C-alpha cells in the first residue's frame, strides 16, 4: 500500500489485506479487507489514529517511513480490538514519547490485551478536544458500537470522522475514496450485519449527533473512506430502524429430501403471494450473505430434519448465530421432519430468545410430506402473508 492524502496534513497509512478470507475464525471475507490507520499532522503535534492488525504491522511501519514521520505525539486508540490496536506496542516502542489516547473504558481493557505501560495512557471523555496546531481532534464516546470502550474521533477543521468499525466494510480496494454506491447494499450492509447488527439499538442513538456534526468524509477502520458521508449514515438509519421488508428468509438443511421438498413448496407458495423469498441451504451457504439477508427480512423460517432428539446441528448452529446477531425479524417459524419424535421445535425456539419474534405455527411432518402436509405448508404461507399485512407490509 502507498501513503494517500485525505486532506492536507491527513494521510492514510494503513494496510490493504487483499488475501484474507476469514475473520474471527468465522466470517468469510470474499473481498478481503483493510486495516486503516490515519496520520494527522498539526503545526505542533502529530497523532496516529488507530493502527493495523499485527499481521500487517510491517506495512504500517513502511508507510510511516514513506510519510517521513519524524514524531508521533499521540496514538489515538478508538477501539481496543486487536485488528486496530495490535500494532500499538510496536509504534509505542518506535516513538517512545508518544502517549496513547483512548476512552476510560479502553484504558481499563487495553493493558489486558496488549503489552502497554498504563502510565502512557491518557483517558479522554466525551467532547474532549485536543489541539494539534490547526488540527483539532474531538472525541465522541460511542459505547456499544461493537465494544463498550469504543469512541469516534472527529477532525473538526477537515470535517473527517474517524469512525473505527462503525460505517466500515470488509472491502479491499485500491482507491482511497468511494461514494459508497457500489458497495452500500453489499459489502457495507454485510459488514453491518456481521458486526454491528447486535448493537443496532445503541448505534441508532448516535446517528443524529453524527449528522449534526456535519462530517464530509467518513474514514472508517476497514474499507474505503466514504464521501459524501451522508449516504452511509442514511443507510444506517434504515438498517438500525425497526422497519422490515416483505421478505422471508428460509434457512434449511435436509438429509433425505423431506425438509427440502417442504422448503421448496413454501418458497413457491410465498412467491405466489408476492412475498420476497431468500433460500439458503445451510450445507453450502456463506454466513455473511445469510446475515445480510437478516438485516431487514420480516420473517425467518428454519427448515430442519430431526437428528436423534433435536434439530440438525447445522440448523442449531444458524439459530445460535441468528440469536447472537439479534435481527429485527418480526416472525419466526420452523418446518421439518422427524422419524419418531424429538424436541426439535422446543430446542430451536429456545435458542432464539434474543430474536423478539412471534412464532407462527410450525409444520413438522413425520417422514416424507404428502398432499396433507403440503396443504399445511400453504397454510403457513397464508399465515405469514397475513402477519405481514397486519404490520403494514405487502
Ligand atoms: Fe475491526 Fe471491532 O474490530
Image: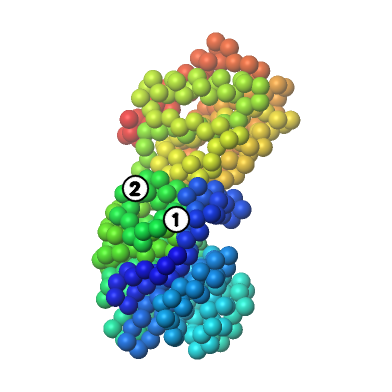
Mark in the foreground, 1 or 2: 1
Q: Nearer the viewer, residue 190 or 42?
A: 42
Residue 215, percent across and down? Answer: 28, 66
Residue at 49 percent across and 31 percent down: it is 279
Residue 218, percent across and down? Answer: 34, 63
| Residue 393 figure quarter | top left
Q: Which mark is residue 311?
A: none
Residue 202, percent across and down? Answer: 42, 59
Q: Nearer the viewer, residue 76 or 269?
A: 76
Q: Nearer the viewer, residue 4 or 291?
A: 4
Q: Is residue 384 left or right of residue 389?
A: right
Q: How many marks?
A: 2
Q: Is residue 135 above or below residue 235?
A: below
- Image quadrant in which the C terminus is located: top left
User: Which residue is tagged 2?
Assistant: 182
User: Crowdedness of circle 1 by 10 Å Cα count: few (<14), some, many (20+)?
Assistant: many
Residue at 43 percent across and 70 percent down: it is 13
Q: Which mark is residue 172?
A: 1
| Residue 365 figure quarter | top right
User: Crowdedness of circle 2 by 10 Å Cα count: few (<14), some, many (20+)?
Assistant: few
Q: Is residue 249 above or below residue 112?
A: above
Q: Nearer the viewer, residue 323 or 132?
A: 132
Q: Is residue 278 above or below residue 381?
A: below
Residue 387, percent across and down? Answer: 40, 30
| Res. 390 visible in picture | no
Q: Is residue 281 left or right of residue 143?
A: right
Q: Is residue 232 above or below residue 328?
A: below
Residue at 43 percent across and 76 percent down: it is 66
Q: Secondary structure at mark 1?
A: loop
- Image quadrant in which the N terminus is located: bottom left
Amino acid at each position: 500500500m502507498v501513503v494517500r492524502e485525505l486532506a492536507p496534513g491527513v494521510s492514510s497509512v494503513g494496510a490493504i489485506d487483499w488475501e484474507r478470507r476469514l475473520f474471527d475464525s468465522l466470517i468469510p471475507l470474499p473481498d478481503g479487507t483493510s486495516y486503516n490507520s490515519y496520520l494527522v499532522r498539526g503545526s505542533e503535534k502529530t497523532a496516529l489514529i488507530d493502527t493495523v492488525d499485527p499481521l500487517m504491522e510491517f506495512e504500517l511501519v513502511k508507510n510511516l517511513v514513506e510519510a517521513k514521520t519524524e514524531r508521533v505525539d499521540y496514538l489515538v486508540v478508538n477501539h481496543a480490538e486487536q485488528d486496530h490496536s495490535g500494532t500499538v506496542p510496536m509504534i509505542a516502542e518506535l516513538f517512545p514519547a508518544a502517549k496513547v489516547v483512548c476512552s476510560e473504558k479502553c484504558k481499563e481493557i487495553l493493558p489486558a490485551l496488549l503489552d502497554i505501560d498504563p502510565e502512557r495512557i491518557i483517558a479522554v471523555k466525551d467532547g474532549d478536544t485536543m489541539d494539534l496546531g490547526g488540527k483539532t481532534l474531538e472525541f465522541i464516546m460511542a459505547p456499544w458500537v461493537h465494544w463498550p470502550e469504543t469512541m469516534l474521533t472527529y477532525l473538526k477543521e477537515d470535517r473527517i470522522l474517524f469512525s473505527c468499525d462503525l460505517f466500515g466494510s470488509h472491502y479491499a480496494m485500491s482507491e482511497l475514496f468511494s461514494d459508497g454506491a457500489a458497495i452500500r447494499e453489499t459489502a457495507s450492509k454485510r459488514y453491518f450485519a456481521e458486526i454491528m447488527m447486535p448493537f443496532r439499538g445503541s448505534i441508532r442513538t448516535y446517528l443524529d449527533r453524527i449528522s449534526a456534526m456535519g462530517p464530509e468524509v467518513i474514514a472508517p477502520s476497514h474499507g474505503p473512506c466514504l464521501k459524501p458521508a451522508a449516504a452511509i449514515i442514511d443507510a444506517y438509519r434504515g438498517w438500525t430502524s425497526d422497519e422490515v421488508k416483505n421478505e422471508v428468509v428460509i434457512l434449511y438443511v435436509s438429509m433425505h429430501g423431506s425438509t427440502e421438498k417442504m422448503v421448496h413448496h413454501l418458497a413457491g407458495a410465498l412467491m405466489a403471494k408476492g412475498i420476497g423469498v431468500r433460500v439458503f441451504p445451510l450445507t453450502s451457504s456463506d454466513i455473511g450473505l445469510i446475515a445480510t439477508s437478516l438485516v431487514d427480512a420480516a420473517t425467518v423460517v428454519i427448515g430442519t430434519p430431526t437428528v436423534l432428539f433435536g434439530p440438525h446441528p447445522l440448523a442449531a448452529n444458524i439459530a445460535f448465530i441468528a440469536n447472537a446477531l439479534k435481527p429485527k425479524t418480526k416472525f419466526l417459524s420452523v418446518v421439518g421432519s422427524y422419524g419418531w419424535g424429538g424436541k426439535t421445535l422446543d430446542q430451536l425456539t429456545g435458542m432464539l430468545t434474543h430474536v423478539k419474534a412471534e412464532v407462527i405455527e410450525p409444520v413438522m411432518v413425520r417422514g416424507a410430506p404428502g398432499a396433507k402436509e403440503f396443504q399445511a405448508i400453504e397454510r403457513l404461507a397464508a399465515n405469514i402473508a397475513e402477519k405481514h399485512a397486519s404490520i403494514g407490509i405487502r
